[in-house]
Amino acid sequence: MDPLHQHFLNQNRRHFLQKMGLGIGGLALGSLMDPFGFGKTPSANDLLQTGPVPLPHFAPKAKRIIYLFQSGGPSQLDLFDYKPLLNKMRGKDLPESIRNGQRLTGMTSGQDQFPLTGSIYNFKQYGESRTWISDLMPYTAKIADELCFVKSMHTEAINHDPAITFFQTGSQQSGRPSFGSWMSYGLGSLNDNLPAFIVMLSRGSGRPNGQPLYSRLWGNGFLSSLHQGVQFRSGKDPVLYLKNPDGVTRAERRQMLDYLAAMNEQQEQFFGDPEVANRIAQYEMAYRMQTSVTDVMNIEDEPDHVFQMYGPDALTPGTFAANCILARRLVERDVRFVQLYHMGWDQHDNLPTQIAKQAKDVDQASAALIMDLKQRGLLEDTLVVWGGEFGRTNYSQGVLTDTNYGRDHHPRSFSIFMAGGGIKPGFTYGETDDFGYNVVKDPMHVHDLQATILNQFGIDHTKMTYKYQGRRFRLTDVAGNVVHSILS
Amino acid sequence: MTPWLDYLGKFHPVVLHLPIGAMVFTFVLVLLALRDQNPATGTIKIGLIFSFFGALISSLLGYLLYQSGGYDEASVQNHLILGWASTFGIGLLWYLLERVVFQKVFAPIFFTVLVAIGLTGHFGGTITHGEGYLDFPEPAPVEVAVNLDSIQLYSQAVAKIFDSKCVSCHNYSKRKGGLAMHLPQALLEGGERGMPYEIGNVAESRLIRYANLPLEDDLHMPPQGRPQLTPTEIELLSHWIASGASFDHTVAYAQLPETVQEAMDVFLPKPLPDVPPLSSDDVLALQENGFRVSSFLANTPFIQVKFEKKELDPKAIGALVDVADQLVELELANTTIAPLLWDKLPQFKQLQKLRLDNTNTSDEQLQKLMELPLRSLNLAGTSITASGISLLSEHPQLEQLYAWNTQVTRQEESTLQEKTPIKLVFGVFEGFSEPQRLKPPMLDTEKTLFETEQLVSFYDKVKGNTIRYTLDGSDPDSTSTLYQDAIVINKSLTLKARVFKSGWLPSPVFEEQFFKVNKTIADYTMETRPSNRYSGVHKLFDFEEGSTNFADGKWLGFSGNDLAFTTQVAAHETINNITVSCMESIGGWIIYPKRVRVLGRKGSGTFTELGRYEYRPTEIPTETTKKSFTVPVKLQQHTELKVIVENIKKLPQWHPAAGEDSWLFVDEILFW
């Protein structure tokens, strides 16, 4: 749609709202009634276009995504990337031919020695796909044939915040729109009563006081504020300040919003700032969320066998497992992008004890979520992604003892897995060398992953752009290739 | 081997069909003669003599062709042996014709020889046309759209051209000129003259050069009489070579030159079926009736529709029928469907995905779905039974069928799946339904220190939970006190509790110590100073415990030095214990104190030691933990107490930062 049309659309919405004071439903209807202001009738395609550009570019395989972000950098060498050589060479120094000048974080750059260490945990092969999975993830192992492992992920950042920002926005510097915001911008919402992009956080029990996460990770950047991620919390108020104050009825709230909208209308006419219209829309969304959020967050109506499936943690609000049940309830209601962050995967020291707790936090619930989606028929068009921002080193940070070691950040190779959404099940893509340090086959860069995920939603990642400050931006910046090999 | 013998070998394909035809015709004569008691064998004999010499010549020529080279030994073996055997067999028939019983012996041997000839022909065909030539072509999948942003030139076009035009002579079993072209590795290996192309250099690539030679030229490829490469195909191959001849690189369709696009079009999936455009009135009608409509594919009439209300009434169904031609995906989950839908459903000729989960769908209606081109059907949570699934098992297009939470029993599930290639999903409980241990209960309050009494309540949001507790230090069981309202605690004690819930294993024991504090410290004199970042000495005596996060504002930190202070004791105060609550965190360089000492004096006398706690850890710590150190004391008219919590000063040998100053963290000191 060209900007002039867009402008006329706005004009029309304004006039319509002025007359009817109806909020977002009115907004939509307003555009339907006479969108071009010149008495030209809209085509069916005009009516169906949800975003600023006609999408999908091609038939989509996925409609929704649940991104289970494992914040902190889970150790691929203790979970999925089995390297027996490291156990054989335990305590020996990492050869320079392997490290090859890789820059280190300030946490290990002072170490004189880089003693190699394999995992203290055993690995076995599972499923028809014979996938190697460590004993830390028994439930994930049960569903190995549903999963597509990528063992050749690599990134550019070596520290948490830039690395997470890179995964979420395609750039290490903050300020660009988040993945979910891009998706909301391009594809629109599938449910008028809930935001298209919802975020939930949980603390890991392995390292409960790890780094915090910043809300800009689900920010809309330069996109319209309608697309920002909304954080749902675990406590009494899932969304802060959503409840009516005591003594205010829903009718009164409605009346208040109508007057507020009318006043905002005047402001918008005066200044012409589209963010005013966005604000009106957000108030309307909040009004609808007053009922829809209560409904979706009320997990007490889930039968007991569901809690058993997701594990005992699911009974405790705010845990990863409880959030997984909520994530399923959200995608059942067609929320486009649900992002869970589970913190605490930053095992610089005491890795063996910490990672066991982290794995226990997420293993059963992640696997249960995938299988629950499957039995409900949602997995075929819901993509589940599980992974962190980078991997961990094959050598010990700090002193290596018989039962204890730590691992520093490692950007050159790490593992993630995906399920559903048209991704090949029971498949492993990419390989690292015997030291688990460098990728030797089929590397997948962060931008490649983003391009591939967008591809599953029918989006050509090079074509979904937003012009800001004279440049057309996109999630994959100027890079990224769709990895066809992992598509089913 | 002389060249003319080589040349003669090329006549093998000309001659070989003569004996085959003659033998088949002779077979017809044999069949006709079977009826007669004394069959006339004259014509049959002529047929056999003709066939025999034809076969002999054909076998000789075939041998010459084989000697001229270019054939894979293994695959020629069968053809060669069977060819000679057939020739011999025909000769044998000629010899036997008038010597054995016609019906019982001759005719069966004849038939056997015919089978041998047939097999010879089959193996010959395999050499010429390649393995799998006879495989029945699988129906090409009808794709709705293709991803035009990333086309893999090799796998999507180049390999297909090679397969249809080159591979019949250049494959694993038949390597003309030593070259095979059926796989990327084979191309890279090349033939007698090296690789068939030079990456990036079209002019020097034999593949293109030979294709462009005049047809009569001996080097022209594919050879005269074989299906030729079309000019657009040559264009495409040239482009592939020029752009690097990659086997996995992808390129956007729009970036290809126009001629290459044209050549590419042949290999891209078929365009969308032609359906009438969607009218905006239809879309509005759908929206008014409670449907959410979205584009299935931008700029096409195809749509997906989801019903957002609870009752699918005839009016709404009417609106759906108006878009029957354009509807690709339909979601009616969680609704009550009016019977009218089932009569209208066969009109939805494009419908690929249908969600009927948690609707009033039953077995009777499923017949109506058989005519639809459905690929995915969701019937979870409906009342369908095994017989309904059996019916759907015959569906020609269906790939996924969801039947979780239906009337199908566990026993029926596996039998049903065995009978159909459709993926049936019945629900996933394997390994996810064993009874599991509950988590211990959580307290609403973290406050465990109090002066008079304390109300304690459990955080309990889950239905069906029961919490049982004890206050006497014993482990709770299913007969212990049931938790209902907040527990009142008015003395120092240990609260233990467990969660019970049917279907779950009871939780581990939860344990919390509560302290009734006898002395409020308001007046004290510090002898050491905490670090500026973790300061505020009053926090030691505010009854507010810290968490395991050392930066939560409730902790005092001492870097490399001890905590020491004095405080006055009044005569009426009874103090039996002094407890110091500390933290240990290896990553934070925080270590428990090595000892706690309590000293006392009377008036302005000298301090004498009243008690001490020596801490001797037996294991190297790995986790962040909290711990209390209690020193029992007996006061005898002491008026002033001194408490010293001793830092270990330097991080020990096992610590990653051994030798650095260690931290001592204390959040609370109690007198009770």
Image: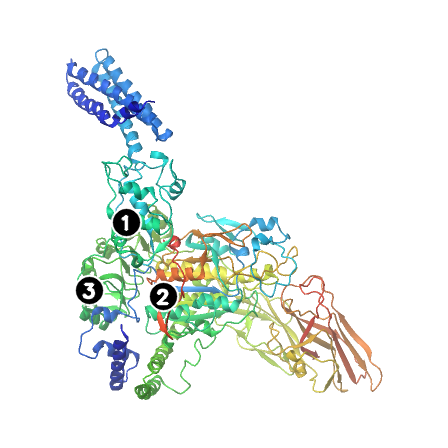
In the image: residue B369, left or right of residue B670: left
Asked whether A357 or A150 is in front, the reply is: A150
Chain identifier of the residue bearing label 2 in the image: A
Residue annotated with mark 2:
A332
Tell me the mark number nearer the camera, choosing from 3 and 2.
3
Q: Same chain for labels 3 and 1? Say yes or no.
A: yes
Residue type (three-letter) at the residue carrying disc 1: Glu
Seen in the picture, residue A145 relative to B648 is either above or below; the reply is: above
Q: What element does badge 1 sit on? A: helix
| Residue B12 image point, x, y percent | 26, 26
Asked whether A35 or B639 is in front, the reply is: A35
Residue type (three-letter) at the residue carrying disc 2: Glu
Q: CA distance from mark 2 to mark 1?
A: 50 Å
Q: Quadrant of the C terminus of chain B?
A: bottom right
Q: Residue B235 — which label?
A: 1
Q: In terms of image quadrants, where is residue A422?
A: bottom left
Residue type (three-letter) at the residue carrying disc 3: Val
Badge 3 crowding class, 10 Å Cα cut-off, few under 14, some 14 to 19, many 20 or more, is many
Q: CA distance from mark 3 to mark 2?
A: 25 Å
Tell me the mark number nearer the camera, choosing from 3 and 1.
1
Chain identifier of the residue bearing label 1 in the image: B
Asked whether B503 or B613 is in front, the reply is: B613
Chain identifier of the residue bearing label 3 in the image: B
Seen in the picture, residue B45 relative to A322 is either above or below; the reply is: above
Residue annotated with mark 3:
B323
Q: What element does badge 2 sit on? A: helix
Q: Given contact means CB atoms under 8 Å apart, are the residues at marks 3 and 2 in contact?
A: no
